[in-house]
Amino acid sequence: MSDTSIVNTSSVSAPAFNGTENFVLEGRTILVTGASSGIGKAVAILCASLGATLVINGRSAERLQAVLDQLYGTDHQMIIGDLTEVDTREALIEAAPLYDGLAYCAGAASLAPVRMANEKHLQQMLSVNYLAPANLTQRLLYKKKLNTGASLVYVTALASRACPSASAGYAASKAALESYIRTLALEHGKQNIRATYVAPGYVDTPMLESLGTMIDMDKQSELTPMGKIESTDIAPGVVYLLSPASRWVTRSILTIDGGLSIAMRL
Ligand SMILES: NC(=O)c1ccc[n+]([C@@H]2O[C@H](COP(=O)([O-])OP(=O)(O)OC[C@H]3O[C@@H](n4cnc5c(N)ncnc54)[C@H](OP(=O)(O)O)[C@@H]3O)[C@@H](O)[C@H]2O)c1
């Protein structure tokens, strides 16, 4: 007979400090862009569930209001507007006295082979995916709107490294943002302001659906070894980077791609 003792874990009371509080966002004010859809919506819902007070942004008033109505807690605000416009960005900056976090989830994807990727296409990708987050960040810093310990998290894309066909504009705009974030982290680390990015593979959102009309996205998604990724699979990664649990993490990339980058030998 074995003498291995069996501990009935149900009789063990939880210690006063068990580390779970590191994952809570209680008392934090977080700005979430792209909150009207897909990944940003999932991030907003999870942040609010963990106690954060949010300022959310999107262009669709109807969809943004529906997200606001779903958020746990009170005192959340929504600001409708296009992030490529200065007025929207200034309204977001002024909506809270100080921010503890930014979850920059807004973005747009449009595909064009290099032969068709004209200046208008490239400008559009850069304007939405690079200039808008860069300009918003600059104003948050310039106007001293970030608390000590603030965490800035940006959703970029595996595409910046994978560079699939027809993604020259999109992938380059995300690569530009990633370089910006790395400089940002370096310049503001001493102020205890962190900057990180989450790079998803294919995620089942309205964006992927709209790309599906341009190319056979089902076939592309099948390349993901671990299967289909949902917005709610990306949100915990973003929330980890916003939370005190990641307080020593900066200038880092968190790839959430279900193994797609392994399959691509990246
Ligand atoms: N889905 C994927 O496979 C995938 C993969 C890698 C990276 N990403 C990145 O993940 C992020 C979220 O994408 P998603 O898949 O969740 O797409 P989505 O469902 O289409 O959501 C995009 C969000 O960005 C907002 N947005 C777009 N352009 C904007 C602008 N000019 N001003 C303000 N808001 C704007 C949209 O607002 P409205 O809808 O209200 O206009 C929406 O809330 C993007 O940065 C995307 O590049 C997605």
Image (spheres, rainbow, N blue to C red):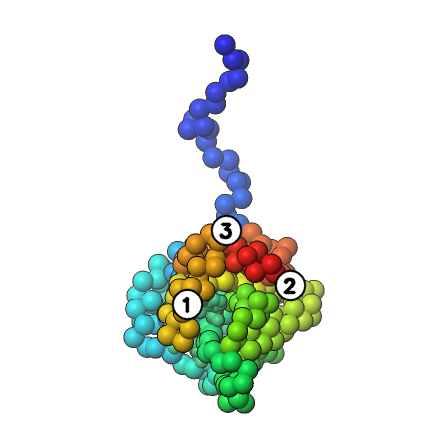
Q: Which residue is mark 1?
A: 217
Where is residue 89 shown, x and y percent of the image?
Answer: 48, 80
- Residue at 63 percent of width and 74 percent of height: 180
State the SS at label 1: helix
The quarter of the picture showing ligand 1: bottom left
Q: Residue at x 51, y 77 (%)?
A: 166
Q: Disc 3 marks which residue?
A: 23
Residue that numbered label 2 is attached to: 251
Residue 143, placed above or below residue 199 = below
- Graded by Cα atoms within 10 Å as few (under 14), some (14 to 19) or many (20 or more), the crowding at tag 2 reads some
Q: Quadrant of residue 60?
A: bottom left
Secondary structure under badge 2?
loop
* Among numbered discs 2 and 1, the one appearing first in the sequence: 1
Q: Amino acid at mark 1?
A: Met
First in residue order: circle 3 vs circle 1? 3
Give me the residue at 32% from left, 72% from top: 63
161 lies above or below 214: above
Is residue 179 visible in the rendered structure shown here?
yes
Residue 80 in view in this figure: no
Check disc 2 and give the amino acid type: Arg
